Structures are given as structure tokens and as C-alpha cells.
Image (cartoon, rainbow, N blue to C red):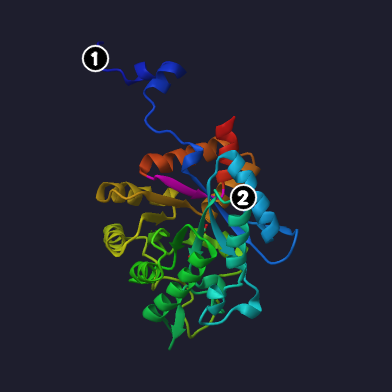
Amino acid sequence: MIIYSRNRRLRSNSTIRSLVQETYLTTNDLVMPLFVMEGKNKQEAISSMPGIFRRSVDLTVLECKELLSLGVKAINLYMKVAENLKDNTGKEAWNANGLMQTTIKAIKDAVPEMIIMPDIALDPYSEFGHDGIIENGKIHNDKTNDALAKMSLSLAEAGADILAPSDMMDGRVAAIRTVLEENNFTDVGILSYAAKYASSYYGPFRSALDSAPVENLDIPKDKKTYQMDFHNSREAIDEVLKDVAEGADIIMIKPGIAYLDIVAKVRQAIDLPIAVYNVSGEYAMLKAAAQNGWIDNDKAIIETLTCIKRAGADMIFSYASKEAAVLLNN
Ligand code: PBG
């Protein structure tokens, strides 16, 4: 039988395969999330995220140096906030001497080349574990925007390069862009979590920061009134286009591996850079399977991150970024 077209021809050896390879993962694509806590020379393992730690500021600075030497040039930052500093307004988020502000300054002093992308959201600072201020049992959108603008200004003053609002309030990109313009922070970027879904894959992250929504009959016990419904995809395009119009520089889609259809769709819709978040639950699943010997850790990391890039990501936030950099360098 004559087969006129044989796809296997271009797979017959690794040299030919490399000639036709469409997607390349490099350390330029990687962003490493870091968890920071109070103290000195302290680090704590996060049990649901093997290999990931909460570190005091001094050790976070050392970690940044190591990341940079591996070619990872951007980090995003999350704070473990002491319970006594949490309230409904989240006001610790714009304390000029707060943990996030101190961390940003320390990193900028010691590793000025590192691009710092702090998370903009109230949940680590909220006594209720919500990304917004609660009034009459509801998340108050516009008051939350005012708080996020204050937090943004404070972090820009501390030296942040790119602000990463992950709260999903309506109009917050415009609120943040306005406060940055009014205060001459014209070069500070906004990476907006435009299509962020209410997902069960954030569990390990919330235990890492002790930031899960509290159980209380009077307030929503999940984040479904602000994060997106996973049944929807057209809505993601609407969210993205609004954030672009409000002045976002980079658009985030989150979570990653179960949402690559959204990434591909958004890639068709916009020309701005796209970031994808390979979230804590995705990392935990990979590590759990690898620890049991059910999948190959290193191959699964490179495959996962490459496929996220293939779907249309320009950069990837992943807890495996450091490990991936080591693998890519070898
Ligand atoms: C907080 C925030 C969350 C994540 C990033 N920023 C948790 C949430 O929305 O509840 C999740 C990250 C992860 O799971 O890796 N606004």
C-alpha cells in the first residue's frame, strides 16, 4: 500500500526532531513565586508543596541571588502575615514598614536586577481570608479597589517593578493605573490576573499562607462572587479585554494545565504578553505522583511548562521554576 504522507518521517531521529521543534522553553520564561515570613535566618517547609519553603527576608534575598545565577530573573512575592495584623480593611497591606515593603527593599538593595512582582490582594491581610473588604455580608468591590490602590502605591514606593493584582475586583486595574500615574510611577507595570478562576487547585497555597476564607455563616465561604466560574470561557475574553483597556501591561490566566484552552483563546484575542500560573495544586499533584514513583519528576516538569508555553504563554509562574532552570541549564 502506498502512503503518500508519512508524519513519522520527521520523527525518525533526534536531529530531525530538533529541526522541526516548534516550542522552546528557556529560563527567560520562568517566574518563581516566593513565600516570606517574619524572623531572621528562618525557613519552614510547606508540607503540601514539597521543596517549597516560607523564608525570612534575609534567606529570601539569598534565594533571589541563587535564582538569578540560574537565570530566573523574576519573582512574585507572597507574605505570611501575623494573625494580629489582620483585619477586615487589610490595612497592613499598605504599611510602609510592612513585611512586603521590607522584603522588596531588601531584594532591590542586594539583587537590583531581579524583577519583583508582588501579589496585589488583601487575602493574606484579611481576618476573613477574602480578597476584598466585607460589608453587610458582601465583598465591597469599590472600597476594595481603594484599598488595592493604596497597597499598590505603597509597593511601588518600596521599589516593585510590576504589580500583580490577583483579586478579581471589577475596575481595579484602572484604579491602580490611576494612582501610579498620579504619583509619577509611570514605569511600574501591571500584570493583571484577568482570567482567574475560582479553583480547587489553590488549596496548598492557602495553607502555605494560612489565608483560606474563614468558615462563617454570614460571609461567603468561597471566592465565587469574584473569581470566575470554571464552566465559562467566553467570559474570560471579556475579562481580558477590559483589563487591557484599563491599562494592564501583561495578562494572567490562572490556573494553568486545566485551562490551556483559555490560554489559546486569549492568545488569539490579544497581542499583549500572556502569563500563565501553574498553581500550587498542580505542583502538589506532580510532586505527589513523582514521590510515589508514578511519574518522572524532571520530565513531567519540563513537559508541563513547555505545553503551557505551546498554548500561548510568554511567561509562566511556577513553583517548579527553580528546578526547571537547573534542568534547562544542564
Ligand atoms: C490570592 C492568591 C491566590 C493565589 C495567588 N494569589 C489564592 C486565592 O486566590 O485564593 C493562588 C496561587 C496558587 O495556588 O499557587 N489572591
- Decide: few, some or many residues near mark 1? Use Cα within 10 Å; few <14, some 14-19, many ≥20: few
Q: Residue 169 falls in which quadrant of the image?
A: bottom left
Q: Judge from the rendering whether residue 35 lies leftward or rightward of residue 123; answer left or right.
A: right
Q: Which mark is residue 4?
A: 1
Report the mark closest to the observer, 2 or 1: 2
As drawn, 322 above or below 163: above
Callout 2 amino acid: Cys
- Badge 1 element: loop
Residue drawn at 50 percent across, 73 percent down = 122
Residue at 58% from the left image edge and 34% from the top image edge: 327
Question: Residue at 61% of width from left, 72% of height from top?
Answer: 97
In percent of width and height, residue 64 lies at: 62, 50
Magenta stretch: give its range.
313-319
Residue 123 percent across, percent down from the top left: 52, 72
Residue at the outermost front position: 184
Residue 66: quarter of image = top right
Q: CA distance from mark 2 to mark 1?
A: 54 Å
Picture coordinates of residue 107 (x, y %)? 61, 56
Residue 106 is inside the magenta segment: no
Asked whether 168 or 230 is in front, the reply is 168
Is residue 296 visible to the viewer in this orientation of the structure? Answer: no
Residue 64 is tagged as 2
Residue 316 is a magenta residue:
yes
